[in-house]
Amino acid sequence: MSEGGQAALAEAQREHWQQTYCEHPGMYGEQPSAPAGHAAAVFRAAGARELLELGAGHGRDSLYFAREGFSVLATDFSPAGLGQLRAAGAAQQLAERVTTAVHDVREPLPLADASVDGVFAHMLLCMALSTEEVHALVAEVRRVLRPGGAFVYTVRHTGDAHYRAGIGHGDDIWEHGGFAVHFFPRDLVDALAEGWSLEEVHPFEEGGLPRRLWRITQNVPE
């Protein structure tokens, strides 16, 4: 895809997600995702205190992490989603533990080097990001993590039923129902783990289709 095509797709997806959150507030419910439960255990075992969630949406996982005692910076490119997160956080008396920042992961992360203990991203890396943009994002995650810090993320993969369905945008990105997804091959997961300690690549399913995903845990070597 050309640079102009990537920019147009990114803007269309930003508008689509903003509209979706406006029309369906709290669309994923209040219960945390299963990967967030796993991530909390990983972070706790590592002695983590300060977390970053990428693509937090309306905040079901960020608020869960806060209830578990972590301090969380929740980022998303949808102001509507983050507004719902802040409202829910205030209602749950978690405002002191959760801060938000509108941020597009195609840009450098708004954090200093080695400033967080853990990073979580549930299906954020498999949004409409090119392989080059995904590599740049993981490099940014590595930059902001402290030594020994853990990165837990999930992605839909090329074994998913929606792979090669809908509108193809190249680079294993397919759009179905208005949502563009970058379906990961295993070699991309391995490439993103170069220079890290890759702890696991765990297959799981989610939703009614079901969506087929991997949950990846990798650490910055100490």
Image (cartoon, helix red, strand yellow):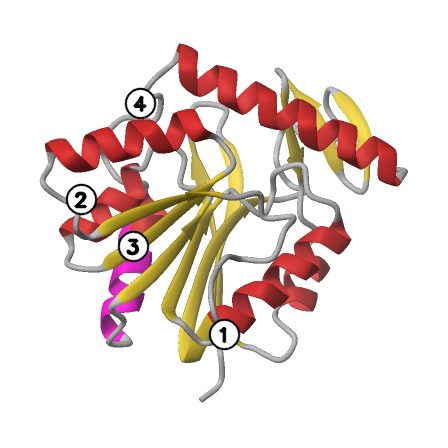
On the question of residue 52 being in view, the answer is yes
Distance from Cα at disc 4 to Cα at disc 1: 32 Å
| Magenta-colored span | 37-45
- Residue pointed to by mark 3: 72
**Residue under the point 76% across and 55% down:** 132
- Residue pointed to by mark 4: 26
Label ID, residue 95: 2
Depth check, mark 2 against mark 3: the one in front is: 2
Number of other residues with Cα within 10 Å of mark 2, as a class: few under 14, some 14 to 19, many 20 or more: some
The answer to whether residue 110 is left or right of residue 149 is: right
- Residue pointed to by mark 1: 113
Residue 195 higher or lower than 186, as above or below:
below
Return the disc, 4 or 1, that comes first in the chain's sequence.
Answer: 4
Distance from Cα at disc 4 to Cα at disc 3: 19 Å
Distance from Cα at disc 2 to Cα at disc 4: 17 Å
- Foreground: 148 or 78? 78
What kind of element bears circle 4?
loop
Q: Do the residues labelled 2 and 3 touch (CB within 8 Å)?
A: no
